[in-house]
Amino acid sequence: MLHAVPFGYQVKQLPVAVAGGADLHIRALLDRQQFYDPLGEAEAAGISEACWPLFGQIWPSSQKLADLMQSYDLADRRVLEIGCGLALASMVIHRRLGDITASDCHPLTEQFLKANLQLNTLPKLKYCTGNWGRSNHDLGEFDLIIGSDVLYERSHPEVLATFIDQHAAAKAEILIIDPNRSNRSAFHKQMASRGFSLHETMLTQALNDGSAYRGRLLQYLRSDPR
């Protein structure tokens, strides 16, 4: 379903299947050609015109993360999704009554999240700006940090590892779904230098619509006090 909106960009609404759970109904950007930054908020956050529409797309790795969160043992852990975009995984956790905070640096992420919560008849979900290269005093620390396809720029391994180190509890688990990006090895090194051990799992099962997928689940653990 296509909707024209009076904000300088177009959106669409579509169902997203979740393995083992009910579909999510998602409002997303129509395509990757959208751009709207009249107040310069995206530019101030360090988001280029080319990267502006990326937050509003449904990415294969984000679907994989949502599938994982449908059955993952959350216990009573405080969970943070980094670079959440359309926040599929956060919504799945929220639907399971987990303690989830979604975060992103895009100025429209929270607006889209509120719209998608309404589409799925879900209550308010905690959201906080999370800009990896800057101070984020309001975030605090988390027991479980999750993300998908977050290593797509050369600068990401160091800034993201630093961000995670700042916001991970002394005993923490980090789960990243990565579509075999070339920056993965550099990220491993950055995380190891901060006391995180790594376990990799290959992901080859097709998406719920039958589309092929190749990637990895990166699980980092830190159990020793800093």
Image (tube, grey):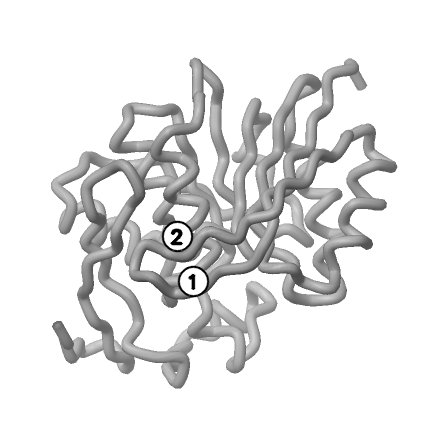
Q: Secondary structure at mark 1?
A: loop
The percent coordinates of residue 212 (x first, y second) are 45, 64
210 vs 32: above or below? above
Other-residue count near label 1 (Cα within 10 Å), few / some / many at <14 / 14–19 / ≥20: some
The percent coordinates of residue 49 (x first, y second) are 51, 81
Taking the spot 12% from the left edge, 41% from the top edge, the residue there is 121
The percent coordinates of residue 160 (x first, y second) are 69, 49
Other-residue count near label 2 (Cα within 10 Å), few / some / many at <14 / 14–19 / ≥20: many
Amino acid beneath label 1: Trp
Which residue, given by chain and number where applicable, does mark 2 sit on? Answer: 63
Taking the spot 18% from the left edge, 65% from the top edge, the residue there is 13
Which residue, given by chain and number where applicable, does mark 1 sit on? Answer: 59
The percent coordinates of residue 3 (x first, y second) are 14, 75
Judged from this view, the residue extending furthest toward the bottom is 33
User: How far is disc 2 from disc 1 in space, using C-alphas?
Assistant: 7 Å
Closer-to-camera residue (220/213): 213
Judge from the rendering whether residue 137 lies leftward or rightward of residue 5; answer left or right.
Answer: right
Looking at the rendered structure, the number of numbered marks drawn on it comes to 2
- The quadrant in which the C terminus is found is top right
Give residue 44's quadrant in the image: bottom right
Judge from the rendering whether residue 97 lies leftward or rightward of residue 39; answer left or right.
Answer: left
- The quadrant in which the N terminus is found is bottom left
117 vs 154: above or below? above
Closer-to-camera residue (84/58): 58
Taking the spot 29% from the left edge, 45% from the top edge, the residue there is 18
Amino acid beneath label 2: Gln
Taking the spot 19% from the left edge, 35% from the top edge, the residue there is 123
Judge from the rendering whether residue 50 lies leftward or rightward of residue 125; answer left or right.
Answer: right
Q: Secondary structure at mark 2?
A: helix
Callouts 2 and 1 close, C-beta under 8 Å? yes
Q: Which mark is residue 154?
A: none
